Image (cartoon, grey):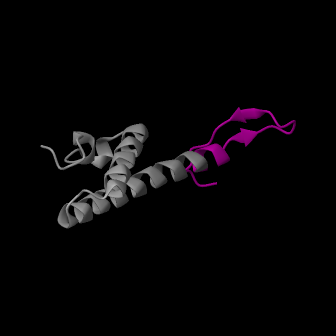
Amino acid sequence: MDEGTGSPATAGQDIAGMSFEQALAALEQIVQALERGDVPLDQSISLYERGEALRLACQQRLDAAQARIERIVTAADGRATGTQAFDAEG
């Protein structure tokens, strides 16, 4: 199924099942298609909506990764001694 982007990564694939890298690549393909300006209006709107969903999924994954990094427990001398789950009460 070709929706003008030349890649099934931007159409039909469940975003939740994508890795961060796959979602980012699909988002980049959508941005390129929209920047070219050769996509019909209705399809542009659909691509924009999918791009926004991909952007949100990527942002959520980045936020989760940052929260995990911020939860690294350090010893008094500054060395990392372990980690704490980002969703744990702290």
**Residue sitting nearer the eye, 60 or 24:** 24
Residue 80 locus on image (x, y percent): 74, 34
Lateral position of residue 25 relative to residue 5, left or right: right
Viewer-nearest residue: 73 or 68: 68
Magenta stretch: residue 36 in it?
Answer: no
Residue extending farthest left: 1
Residue 53 image point, x, y percent: 34, 58
48 over 69 or under it: above or below: below
50, above or below 68, in the image: below
The image shows residue 89 at horizontal and vertical percentages of 59, 55
The residue that appears at 33% across and 41% down in the rendered structure is 18
Q: Quadrant of residue 56?
A: bottom left
Task: Name the foreground residue: 26 vs 86.
Answer: 26
**Residue located 39% across and 47% down the image:** 28
Q: Assess whether residue 74 is covered by the magenta stretch.
A: yes
State which quarter of the image contains the C terminus: bottom right
Image position of 19 with respect to 36: above or below: above
Q: In which quarter of the image is residue 9?
A: top left
Q: Can residue 87 be seen in this view?
A: no
> Which residue appears farthest toward the right when viewing the image?
77
Q: Can residue 13 be seen in this view?
A: yes
Is the stretch drawn in magenta largely helix, strand or loop?
loop
- In this orientation, which residue lies closer to the viewer: 61 or 6? 6
Q: In which quarter of the image is the N terminus?
A: top left
Q: Which residue is drawn at 37% across and 39% down?
A: 22
- Numbered circles on residues, count: 0
- Is 74 positioned to the left or the right of 27 in the image? right
Residue at the spot 80% in from the left edge and 33% down from the top edge:
79
Q: Give the range drawn in magenta.
A: 67-90
